[in-house]
Amino acid sequence: MNLARLIDKPECPFCWRVRLAAAWQGRPLQLLWRDNPAVQAEWERLSPSRSVPLLIDGELVLNDSNAILEYFNDTGPALLPADPLLRARARNLIAYADNPLGTALRPLVFEKRDKPRDQWDPYLLAKAAADFEQAVLPLEALLSEHRHFINDIPNLADCALLPRFALAARYGLAIPAQAPQLGRWYQRLSTTAAFATSAPAGWSKELCA
Ligand SMILES: N[C@@H](CCC(=O)N[C@@H](CS)C(=O)NCC(=O)O)C(=O)O
């Protein structure tokens, strides 16, 4: 059987959640770097939205990270609980990872990634930090009863949230002290083999801490 292929961009949080889900499932994936000229023609042909991740599994082509996560859940070890209410909560958290969390982080990442340090806008950075904190704090209460979001096993909510926090740390935003359970969740999950396997190459624990 041919290996499923993922057209991928290492730092993209949408790609990372897919790599993380695959790692937690033990699902083999062939990763293809989107910027590789040998990959680009196929990506352009199969991705009308010109976005990553893009999964190709036999005749199936999926253009959206959440569709890929659901497909993985349906065809491998479960990454969503059986209870419909808990499944709905997990999906709600996946959306939360994008908005407000991703929305808060995006300007910070672009500012620091694309400009030299002496051109960083302090007001933009301060607003990103405040927006991040506002988005993070409501998550703290959700971890009071469980080791993971939703339940006690790694699930799709963890897959979507963990890369956001790793990117935040990478770009200088730590989990606030008022969210100690969240800090412990991050510490636990960012030291798993699945995290190490799925993190962009060259990311060390120190960079992500
Ligand atoms: N809703 C899409 C969003 C994917 C997305 O925004 N990907 C970004 C990278 S993080 C992208 O492909 N941007 C265009 C590019 O990098 O050329 C999903 O969940 O897969």
Image (cartoon, helix red, strand yellow):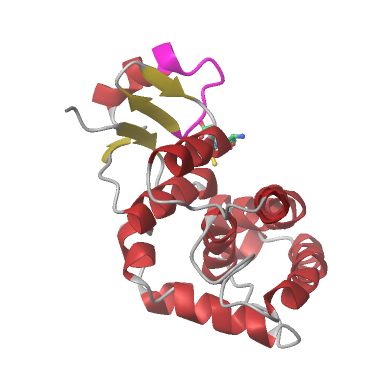
Q: Nearer the viewer, residue 104 or 79?
A: 79
Chain part drawn in magenta: 44-53
In this image, 58 relative to 49: left or right? Answer: left
Relative side of 25 to 12, left or right: left
Tell me where residue 94 appears, x and y as whole percent. Answer: 65, 50
For residue 182, above or below residue 171 = below
Q: Is residue 3 left or right of residue 49?
A: left
Would you say 49 lies left or right of 77 here? right
Looking at the rendered structure, the number of numbered marks drawn on it comes to 0
Q: Examine the rendering and report whether any part of residue 28 can be seen.
A: yes
Q: Identify the residue shown where x is 54% and y is 53%.
A: 156
Q: Most prominent secondary structure in the magenta stretch?
A: loop
Q: Residue 209: in sight, yes or no?
A: no
| In magenta segment, residue 46 | yes
Q: Quadrant of ligand 1?
A: top right
Q: Is residue 51 above or below residue 48?
A: below
Q: Quadrant of residue 101?
A: bottom right
Q: Quadrant of the N terminus?
A: top left
Q: Position of residue 74 (x, y in %)?
A: 46, 38
In x, y percent, where is residue 180?
67, 87
Q: Position of residue 78 (x, y in %)?
A: 46, 51
Residue farthest to the top, as pictured: 45
- Examine the structure image and report whether residue 49 is included in the region drawn in magenta: yes
Q: Residue at x 40, y 30 (%)?
A: 55
Q: Residue furthest left?
A: 1
Specify the quadrant of the image occupied by residue 191: bottom left
Residue at 55%, 61% (x, y): give it: 158
Q: Residue at x 74, y 70 (%)?
A: 139
